[in-house]
Amino acid sequence: MKRIICLLLMLSLLLCACGGQKTEPAPDTEPTTAPAQTVTTGSEPTEPSETLPTQSVPSEPQVTEPSSSEPETSEPETSEPPFSFPEVEDTEPIIPPETEPTGPAPVIPTDYINPLTGEYLEAPYQNRPFAVVMDNDNDQAMPHWGMSAADILWEMPHEGNTTRFLGMFTDVSDVARLGPTRSARPYLLNLAMGYDAIFVHAGHSEQAKIDLAQTGWDHIDGVKGEYSYFRRDKSRVEAGIDSWHTMYITGSKLLQAVKDRDLTTSRGQTVDYGMTFAADGTPVGESAESINIRFKKGGKKTDLWYDADLGVYMAKQWGQTLSDSNNGQTLTFENVLILEADVGTISDYGSLSVDLVGSGDGYFACGGAYVAIRWSRASTNVPFTFTLTDGTPLTFGVGNTYAAVVMTGSPVSFS
């Protein structure tokens, strides 16, 4: 009997060892064992029960190892395919192109626009311009001083089959010299009055003297008035050049003369000279890469040509290119304006009259092309109005202008 009990205990221990469970007694408690069988001596032993004795052993909680696969969820399946990263090619990064801002372009106040060139200004412009009479009798007047700073360079008929320049300047503060300055003529004063310009000259014809007195127009005279502000170029004098080709005034001296004379320089408001501008003023017309101007039949000639690389016109006379002695720059022009006007004689000396009030024909060139135009002017004290032949307002290119007034019917050619 004892052998059977021992075998049963050994079998129980073996089963526990094969289950891999480790048993430890609970703290402060004795392990529970099955009660031992009582053996009575002197009597037949009792047969053991068919049930095996049990041993109470505390067991460890079962630990579940994490699964290598994602746990199943109770969420409903969707029709979307499983996410996968796209293949990336080894290419240069794509930079999105810059886009132009949308919406209307900013409007520049008219006070900040040069009314003679259409160019942007850093400060409002409400001043009166200067109209400076410059010599152009012959090539001894060349090279001129200060012409590269002119907003409009007018070339007008003059006695003796010559011409005279009238430079229109909105700013002379940085101009080293202006000249050679020459005497006034009525039509030059007439032109200056249309721009409300301070008139700068050195002497005058008899009729111009009368007109200046009758109108009381603001002017600076280097011969009969403010002579002390003018100078003569010593190098030209020493070279034997005629004296009337030697006089000039500096920009700073001109401003000082205006101040000393207490002349009004500001209008206090924006002025309109009847000029409309665009970044590209090229007209829809015929080719004008070369322009040949005669101021009257058989008279003085000025030739202009278009430089397509620079996008400007240049001019020459007497075989010399127009340039500025102040800085050595060749004169360039964005626009070319040619007006026909009636020209007559008003004295035995040959002084001319040029009718700049009324209307007439003309031409406009810009960007290597030209068109026929019309000009009109109601009176001396107002600016010109320029239109195409169909009445459409003329548009100038932003920049300066060479303007010629020629006798009606004078030869003008384009090619």
Image (cartoon, grey):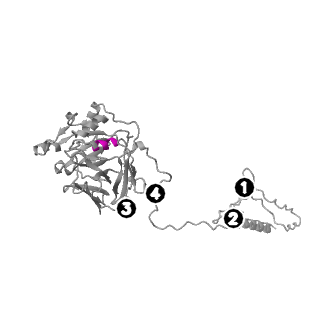
On residue 159, the disc is none
* Residue pictured at 81% horizontal, 60% vertical: 36
Tell which circle, 3 or 2, labels the residue nearer the N-terminal end.
2
Q: Amino acid at mark 3?
A: Gly
Q: Say which residue label 4 marks.
A: 98
Asked if residue 12 shows in the view, the reply is yes
Residue 263 is a magenta residue: no
Residue position for label 2: 72
Q: For this rendering, which residue is in front, 372 or 145?
A: 372
Check residue 285 in the rendering and tell me which mark sits there, or answer none. Answer: 3
Depth check: 211 or 237 in front?
Answer: 211
Q: Residue 65 occupies which quadrant of the picture? A: bottom right
Q: Which residue is mark 1?
A: 25
Choose the circle earlier in sequence order: 1 or 2: 1
Residues at discs 2 and 4 in contact (Cβ within 8 Å) = no
Please provide percent x and percent y for residue 110: 42, 44
Q: Quadrant of the N terminus?
A: bottom right
